Image (spheres, rainbow, N blue to C red):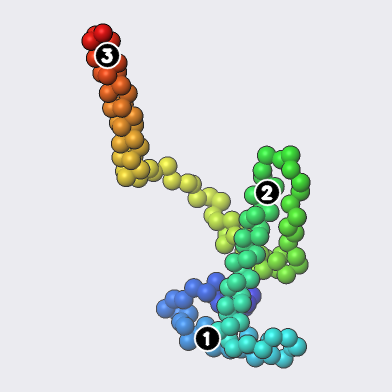
Amino acid sequence: MTKHPELQSGKLSATFTYKNAQKLWEEVTARLRQIPGAVKEWNKWRKTWQDMRSATKAKNTSIKKHAQGTGGGPASSQVLTEIDQNILTLIGPTVVEGHNSTQESNVQFVSNLIIKLNIRLKKILISFLFLLIYLHVAFMC
């Protein structure tokens, strides 16, 4: 995995094709079959890697989110194992945390604004109708 970062990311390109990835996963599978444990085909090992990578990222995010919380509760029961730490090191901080230099967008989509305006307009109309009813009743009596 360290020799082929494109394999661990799973991203294909013009220079790293599906056939390249399959060949490398078959090499990984051959090595894994030399040690005791589960026996799987290359595509199952690839899925195992994807699942482990995803679970480790989620676990790391959960631990960080808990640590940044307001406090007052018990400490997080989740702990990164040595395997988790190795996976995080392998995939790199950008994959886990994103780009630190990237600014968040302040763009609001027009559809969200329209929905908010419609809700506000409905509230104003309802208030106006209640006012008209009140005035009508007040002047009729």
Residue 60 position within the rendered picture, expressed as x and y whole percent measured from the top left: 66, 58
Which of pointers 1 and 2 lies earlier in the amino acid sequence?
1
Going 26% across and 18% down the picture, which residue do you hit? 132
Q: Nearer the viewer, residue 55 or 17?
A: 55
Residue under label 1: 22
- Secondary element at image label 1: helix
Residue under label 3: 137
- Secondary element at image label 3: helix
In the image, what residue type sits under mark 3? Val
Residues at marks 2 and 3, CA–CA distance in whole angstroms: 56 Å
Quadrant where the C terminus lies?
Answer: top left
Residue 105 position within the rendered picture, expressed as x and y whole percent measured from the top left: 43, 46
Residue under label 2: 66
* Quarter residue 5 falls in: bottom right
In the image, what residue type sits under mark 2? His
Q: Nearer the viewer, residue 120 or 20?
A: 120
Going 65% across and 91% down the picture, which residue do you hit? 30
- Secondary element at image label 2: helix
Query: On screen, 75 above or below 93?
Result: above
Nearer the viewer's eye, disc 2 or disc 3? 3
Q: Nearer the viewer, residue 99 or 65?
A: 65
Q: Residue 131 carries which label?
A: none
